[in-house]
Image (cartoon, rainbow, N blue to C red):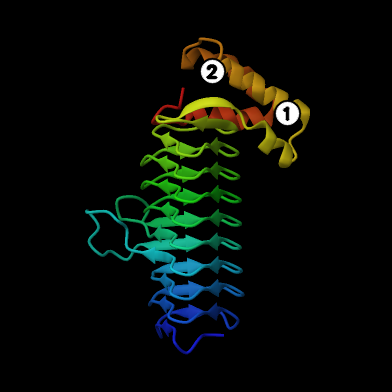
Amino acid sequence: MIDARAVVSPEARLAADVRVGPFAVIGPGVEIGPRTIVGPHTVINGPSVLGADNHVFQFASIGDAPQDKKYRGEPTRLVVGERNVFREFCTINRGTTHDKGVTRIGDDNLFMACSHVAHDCVVGNNTVFANGAVLGGHVEIGDWVILGGLVAVHQFARVGAHAFLGGGSMVRQDVPPYVMVSGNPAEPQMVNAEGLKRRGFSEEQIRAIREAYRILYRSDLKLSEALARLEPLARERAELRLFVDFIQASSRSIVR
């Protein structure tokens, strides 16, 4: 299953059915789970752990050192879940000692060509990074988030679950769950209603989310006033609890 022209460190651990293409390089400290495909000319460095059923396409760079001038070669990590797809020229960096020392990626994510995940980021499940979408260091991306082409997310920003970042957006502040943003700087546009329908949200749930969006963005209220109105609604509806809790936990403030 390993092409004779590949270079695999004796200190790497690969499941028996991992497929490795020609001229791929797998360094020491790398662990790769069952049924994963490593394409030709890819580089995977460690310490890094990739779970089962991942597919790394040609010319991707996974688990290399962070692009951080403060990094001094410490043994930080990358941890990747299952069923992720990393397309051509995708780059995923390990963590730094200036955070938790690990970059984490969940399950079932698609990273299109030339996308980038910087050091110490946390990416959830079922996300899509379109071509050229990039994250600065320490960014958190929730489940089911879609990043359009050439999106850039500022260091330490957070993007809530089910958010949609329109192509070319420059995201400098936190994006609450369910919200569609676009522009430079990114501004809120509407609720990602179509995405919510595809994921099984009921019409009643979507109406509640739209009302919460209206209170936050269309009522000319200060943030503290909007949260005061949203809190009683969140006690009744779990989908709004996620929305309110995210905003309350924001340290960079939210896009408005």
Q: Residues within 10 Å of mark 2 (few under 14, many from 20)?
A: some
Q: Quadrant of residue 193?
A: top right
On the picture, is 131 further left or further right than 9?
A: right
Residue 65 appears left or right of 177: left
On residue 217, the disc is 2
Q: Relative to 12, is 70 on the left or the right?
A: left
Query: At x 32% / y 56%, what residue is drawn?
Result: 96
In front: label 1 or label 2: 2
Mark 2 element type: helix
Label 1 vs 2, first from the N-terminus: 1
Q: Is residue 136 above or below residue 235?
A: below
Residue at 44% over, 87% down: 5
- Give whichever of 99, 57 is nearer the camera: 57
Q: Answer above or below: position of 98 versus 188.
A: below
x and y percent of residue 162 in the render? 60, 38
In the displayed structure, 18 sits above or below 88; it is below
Residue that lies at the very extreme toward the top in this rendered image: 220
| Position of the N terminus by quadrant | bottom right
Residue displayed at 77% across by 28% down: 203
* Tag 2: amino acid: Tyr
Name the residue type under label 1: Gln
Residue furthest right in the image:
203
Q: Which mark is residue 187?
A: none
Could you tell me how many numbered marks the image carries?
2
